[in-house]
Image (cartoon, coloured by chain):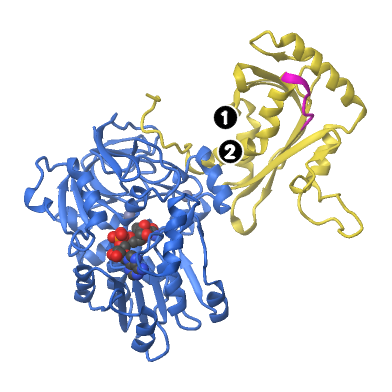
Amino acid sequence: MNRLTPNRRQLARGIADNRTYLLVSLAALTGAGALALALNQSRQANDQHPPDDAPGRTGRRSRFGRFAVSGRTVTINRPRQDVYDAWRDMSRLPHFMENVESVTVQGDLTRWTIRGPADFDVELETRIVSDRPGEEIAWRSTENSAVETSGKVMFRDAPAGRGTEVEAVIAYVPPAGRIGQMIAKLFQAEPSIQGRRDLKRLKMLLETGEIATSRNRKTTA
Amino acid sequence: MRALTWHGKHDVRVDTVPDPEIVNPRDAIIEITSTAICGSDLHLYDGVIPGLMGGDILGHEFMGRVVETGPDSSLEKGQRVVVPFTISCGSCFFCKNHQFSACDNSNPVEKQDITENLYGHAMSGLFGYSHLTGGYPGGQAEYVRVPFSDVGPIVVPEGMEDDDVLFLSDILPTGWMAAENCDIKEGDIVAVWGCGPVGLFAIQSALLQGAGRVIAIDHYPHRLELARNLGADVIDFTRTHVLEALMEMSGGHGPDAVIDAVGMEAHGFAPDRWLDVAKQTVGVGADGGHALRQALMAVRKGGRVSIPGVYGGFLDKFPLGALMEKGVQVRSGQTHVQHYINDLLKRIEEGEIDTTFLISHRLSLEDAPLGYRNFHDNQNDWTKVVLKPGLTAPQPSEVEA
Ligand SMILES: NC(=O)c1ccc[n+]([C@@H]2O[C@H](COP(=O)([O-])OP(=O)(O)OC[C@H]3O[C@@H](n4cnc5c(N)ncnc54)[C@H](O)[C@@H]3O)[C@@H](O)[C@H]2O)c1
Ligand SMILES: [Zn+2]
Ligand SMILES: [Zn+2]
């Protein structure tokens, strides 16, 4: 069952909405398929314009089947293994992920509580489906997840000794309905901005040992 | 503590605000002993730089005593330091390449979105400037929080006065980098627009870097006089056709390099300028570029254009054709202060560079609004204002102008 946990009475409605899209989703492209498409070069070929070499998610089309895909790449001036280690310790993700309230890890299952707009949290459960130390970590949501999603983070040596290129890509099914809209807002309107911000925070932590802030005091007065 | 805060166009006040604290491990807290008002502050004062918020503490040229250190600061309590206005982490790609004002890690992540859209990339954090560059509380205050205090600040050698070293925080390295961006060859003719503090230091630097002749352009007699004292020939643009004069003074060749030390609020009578001002007034994000347009027209074929003057948005009627057809090179940027500061400190110590000749007024922090008003309205005489939080009483003799 879905694990949508709104603080309000939106619960019932959310479940209904959720069922709808879960049902619909069975027929179509899987998240992993969408990810693969998004990672590879744009397939939006037509007669006049053959495929180019840019990642698919930067294409003018941003849907892959039922999936919306977003992703970012950031270069971190640290060895590949260090960056991988920082990410693999999932319980540390809330340190640099702004909207992630908490993460609990049980074997290869990870439970995420994501702070949503308008006072409600979204719970996700994901399973690690690929783990290649120093190279890549991929995960996919289980059926206990409020949103159908899969993601992947890849680590490559950056050119010219610049450290590591970290590329994170997330595919998800934009949910329908009112709660869906809220989740969508959380995942869709912002994921590329959020992803960019989160990756940059990770970069700050790894490169400087701290996350820059212009706050003048420890607690906001 | 007391601090100079921004509240809107031509509205700055000294308010009581909470003292800063150590927030991150590499922070230090500095008690300010001297802090200056910069031409860049005037762009904020005039409200032509986007991204300020009511109550922001201004000031990016400052020095003082270390009063508190975070666990990872390399500073010690009691040390006297000068602090670069650019906040830089020291370990990212750009810092490693000494492009400190392009630091990846000092502008808070949530403040970077706007500049990524506006400029394509976010720049480093700056003290006391726009929220586009982090919105860091500035140093026109009794205390300031200095992030990455193990990278930026330099310790002042015993026996050197505040006024000798204060300008290492910005305008001296800015003038030096402006000249360096001209790739000066021995004997070159360099023309400098603007004889404010940045222009004056650019003139001094260009001569030290081997220029054969520097021609300085402004309209304030006293500022032109200061330029002449440094060894420049001067043009008063209210008396003279600048382009014609520059051609004649360079044998019909044109200056080998030109420096725009004016920035986005150029003065003058030309029609392009009125259009810029009109657009700035209605807030369409247009920069004023009269000096820069003229500089591009003046520079010789294949010459160099150096732009220390600040621009924030878009420039209309930019003579791109002149740039392309003449094959000129353009270099610019917020100054990479940390790259220059040690070398320039040595030059001051050895007496090669004098930094004090342009200070016209020393005021208490409480008198900062008066300093802003006059540095803005009476530019001829008010060439550089230094605020001393330690000075309690106003200095009446210096206040009238
Ligand atoms: N790149 C950097 O890191 C950096 C650092 C400090 C200052 N700045 C910028 O440098 C510029 C100058 O700073 P400042 O402190 O000397 O300012 P300032 O306002 O004291 O001086 C500007 C001078 O330019 C003159 N001027 C105006 N219009 C002119 C024109 N059309 N032709 C010739 N001269 C003209 C003015 O009369 C004035 O004397 C500003 O834009 C400032 O923001 C840049
Ligand atoms: Zn300045
Ligand atoms: Zn840096």
Under mark 1, the amino acid is Glu
Residue linked to disc 2: A197
Residue that extends furthest to the left in the rendered view of this protein: B397
Residue name at image x 16 percent, y 55 percent: B361
Of mark 2 and mark 1, the one earlier in the sequence is 1
Residue linked to disc 1: A98
Who's yellow, chain-wise?
Answer: A
Who's blue, chain-wise?
Answer: B
Image location (x, y in percent) of residue A12: 75, 9
* Ligand 3 lies under 8 Å from the Cβ of mark 1: no
- Dot 1 falls on which chain? A
Under mark 2, the amino acid is Arg
Left or right relative to B375: residue A59? right
Frontmost residue, A43 versus B340 = A43
Task: Classify mark 2: residues with Cα within 10 Å, few (<14), some (14-19) or many (20+).
Answer: many
Left or right relative to B107: residue B358? left
The local secondary structure at tag 1 comes to loop
Image location (x, y in percent) of residue B281: 43, 52
Reply above or below: B385 against A198: below
Reply above or below: B343 against B328: above
**Residue A107 in view here:** no
**Residue A64 in view here:** yes
Q: Which residues are magenta?
A: A172-178
Instruction: Find out whether the residues at labels 2 and 1 contact each other: C-beta distance under 8 Å.
Output: yes
Left or right relative to B66: residue B88? right
Image quadrant for the C terminus of chain B?
Answer: bottom left
Frontmost residue, B133 versus B150 = B133
Residue A173 on the magenta segment = yes
